[in-house]
Image (cartoon, coloured by chain):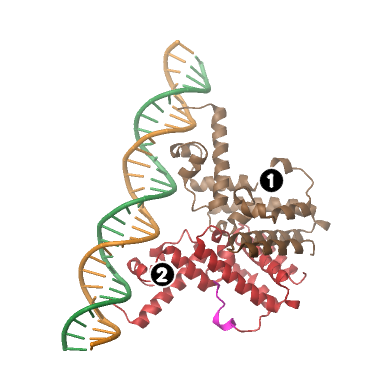
Chain colours: A brown, B red, C orange, D green
Amino acid sequence: MRVTREQFRENRRRILEAAGRLFREKGFAAVTVAEVMEAAGLTHGGFYGHFASKEDLAAQALAQALAPAPQEAGAAPDLAGFVAAYLSAAHRDRPGSGCALAALGSEAARQPAPVRRAFTEGLEARLARMQEAMPGGDRAAALSVLSGLVGALVLARAVDDPALSDEILAAARDVVGCP
Amino acid sequence: MRVTREQFRENRRRILEAAGRLFREKGFAAVTVAEVMEAAGLTHGGFYGHFASKEDLAAQALAQALAPAPQEAGAAPDLAGFVAAYLSAAHRDRPGSGCALAALGSEAARQPAPVRRAFTEGLEARLARMQEAMPGGDRAAALSVLSGLVGALVLARAVDDPALSDEILAAARDVVGCP
DNA sequence: CTTCTTAGATGACGACAATCATGATACGAT
DNA sequence: ATCGTATCATGATTGTCGTCATCTAAGAAG
């Protein structure tokens, strides 16, 4: 069963996309190679024709998940809108298509070097774009806002009580703009 | 090999302590029952005499890890000191004895109900103690500070670049006290 | 059109982990 | 002191996962 070079690239793209979604939804450890391949519409056997290992896939999928979406590549960032979307219930409830920093943050710290490097580069890119939108281009302020966003989303997702979860998001929303 | 009732309780305590440390260091999924038992000085077989399942262990270990340490149980909380310790390099570098909210946050969201409940209760307890220390007892302010602390620690641990990691901690430190 | 190459399907393999069964041994109650 | 019982050690069991070998069929090159 051979496929077009075009189809090959498309398959690789689908694998990365499925992996990015599944990793964010279930974490690195809980996702299996076979599961990713099935989600991409393939069987597990062809996996090692695309990636060297699960770790390799994790690093590349994370890099892609953290890369800015094409439509917002060069757009002027709107900080208030970004914060509102980030701290929305919709974002909290759909980790698979949301921010990978929050979805994989505490797990990323324990991953092998390539994964952590992808995480770091994604964070720097996000930071740079937030910094552009900050009054005065204050990098430290952008960092602390990003920390607040990530922390609030992590806690809002982990908590078992919907009211408390909403409260966490609302509290973080109210604070942004102060520093 | 039977053991004193006293020794039995002591063994259980050691298992919970080892589990709390290992889970924070390596995450829920990456820790095995046998590993926990070995760290507690026992073999894997006796585990199910103490806990019903690994999930049961996770919930109880998390609850204990999030419970306030005995020495700070009723102490008057010093917010500035707490924040400084939380955002210190020492805390970042020793997750096994640090805050479980940051160490397990993004993974906790995907755990079964008992684990999430323990997480929620631990967060509420921590929140209440921070609220006491806040000017005006502002619960929303306490929530947003806690979010900022957790987010900064998560990112500082995940990042591959030591300078950036320090920068994240420093930026978060500078912001606290503003809202 | 023929031949070479290669992507993917099938399936196997080895490692490992959660859980449970069994047995020995020493505590605790009588 | 003795006996029942509970705790831990040993080991089996079952399932799963990452990885690799092999086979096939179909694109690509000439």
Q: Are marks 1 and 2 on the same chain?
A: no
Q: Tell me the kind of residue under disc 1.
A: Pro
Q: Secondary structure at mark 2?
A: helix
| Chain identifier of the residue bearing label 1 in the image | A
Write down the quadrant of residue D1 in the picture: bottom left
- Residue B71 is inside the magenta segment: yes
Mark 2: few/some/many CA within 10 Å (<14, 14-19, 20+): some
Q: Quadrant of the N terminus of chain B?
A: bottom left
Residue at image coords 73%, 73% = B138
Q: Which mark is residue A68?
A: 1
- Residue A2's place in the image compared with D11, above or below, is above
- The percent coordinates of residue B113 (x first, y second) are 51, 62
| Chain identifier of the residue bearing label 2 in the image | B
- Residue B38 is inside the magenta segment: no
Residue at image coords 75%, 53% = A130
Residue at image coords 69%, 45% = A68
Give the residues in magenta. Answer: B66-73
Mark 1: few/some/many CA within 10 Å (<14, 14-19, 20+): some
Residue to which mark 2 is pinned: B39
